[in-house]
Amino acid sequence: MGASVFDIFKVGIGPSSSHTVGPMRAANHLVNALAAEDKLAQVEHLRIELFGSLGATGRGHGTDRAIMAGLAGETPECADPSSLFTHAGQVAATQSLRLTSGDADTAIVFSPECDIIFAPFKRLAYHPNALTFTLTFADGSTRQATYYSVGGGFIVPDDGTGEPVRATLPPVDVPYPFASGAELVQHCVRANSPIPELVLANEIARGRTGVEVQAGLLNLWQVMTDCIDLGCRTEGTLPGGLGVQRRAKAHLAALVQQETNDDPLAGLDWVSLWALAVNEQNAAGGRIVTAPTNGAAGIIPAVLRYAMTRPRASDAMVVEFLLAAGAIGAIFQATASISGAEVGCQGEVGAAASMAAAGLCQVMGGTVQQVVNAAEIGLEHHLGLTCDPIGGLVQVPCIERNAVGATTAITAARMALRRETQMVSLDKVLETMMATGADMTHKYKETALGGLALSFAAC
Ligand code: SF4
């Protein structure tokens, strides 16, 4: 059926959509389910196992902090990012954890050190990002609940047999269902409408008014803008122990000083700055718009900010950009992957560059086919991109990679505008991305066991 644009873009916290936001949502889901059954107060003990990629890089991605906060009732949308560190410290110091869902609340004895187990070498069949909660109740009974964090903050519960629970909600009847680039183009041609109009009609069918969709998208843009601005004002060392220095603030000062610079490519330095600023905020665990993941969250804000420096920038342009980019994100989500643990960084930075290219091509006046071609070019040149974060942190190469991804997206959009045809289709390149991801060893899929992560460790 395809995801809503508000599933693709959502407010969350850094540093990772699959390793921070998804696990927090899984914890929310668990406590809410227990409260609904009136079982929350009967929990006596809880053990959490993090498998595969969550086990390998969960410490660097703050997975443990996010889960503890989620169990205490915090949500990715509303949690104060800095409170996660404080909360985790309190749990460790008191060896006590609150389980909270609305008014239901209980405290259990809990040791993060002993009760959160990182198991990188155990991989569950359905997805490399899996976590299992094992609960012991006051009557001595036990229960397990497993969740898969499948990328972009999306979670899927296990049905108890190692298989994901299939959709429980009835499908929403939208006027223009699409799960591929070809279907999207076909609808647009038949309706004689550009992509944003179709996506807007689908969103309205999902229950929002047109005004609410516009307000929701402008709110997301405001969060992106705030994130850029805060990143540009903040300096210091990023957390995690690698000693990575923030550079956006100094980069901004240098750009302002060179404002009379007649370098024709100076604009690209600004695009890089905006991407760096967002991803530094993300790496620090700040407030972020997942777009479509956190690791790749800088690309769309940077390219949209670039679009807004162009003539005739307006709120309507922001809405058009995000609707077109969201349509491409929904296709990734429906038929491919936005999970670095599943297909490597091609599914994160590649997906974000593809979406940003489509959004920019749209607001630069591209035809429907050109917008889809821009998405294809944006992804094609990220095929095979591995995920190898040094120290399991979303810092190196991730932060710079967003700056490069943003400039690639701009090039892709501008190239797409030059002609109507493209030898490789978006659907073919998505298929190729999945096949390439399947061929990659797990070392290159968010485990920090290969590539740069290994070279750096060996130095
Ligand atoms: S290398 Fe890419 S996929 Fe891996 S954590 Fe960084 S941004 Fe995400």
Image: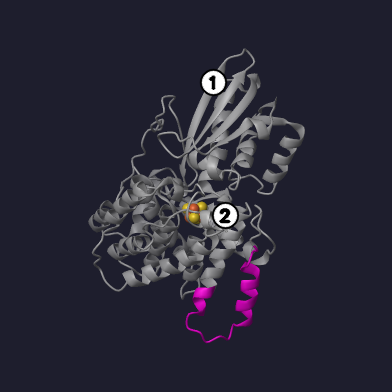
Residue 130 location in percent, x, y?
49, 36
Q: Is residue 193 left or right of residue 19?
A: left
The three-letter code of the residue at mark 1 reads Arg
Between discs 1 and 2, the one toward the N terminus: 1
Of residues 218 and 120, which is closer to you in this image? 120
Q: Which residues are magenta?
A: 245-269
Q: Is residue 32 one of those drawn in magenta? A: no
Q: Secondary structure at mark 2?
A: helix
Residue at x 66%, y 59% (from the top left corner): 243
Q: What residue is pinned by disc 1? A: 143
The image position of residue 354, as x and y in percent, is 39, 60
Amino acid type at circle 2 is Ala
Q: Quadrant of the C terminus?
A: bottom right
Q: CA distance from mark 1 to mark 2?
A: 39 Å
Q: Which residue is mark 2?
A: 457
254 part of magenta stretch: yes
Q: Kindly tell me whether residue 414 is visible in this rendering.
A: yes
Going 46% across and 73% down the picture, which residue do you hit?
Answer: 312
Quadrant where the N terminus is found in the figure: top left
Tell whether label 2 touches label 1 (CB within 8 Å): no
Seen in the image, is 449 located left or right of residue 373? right
Image coordinates for residue 144, horizontal then vertical, percent: 52, 24
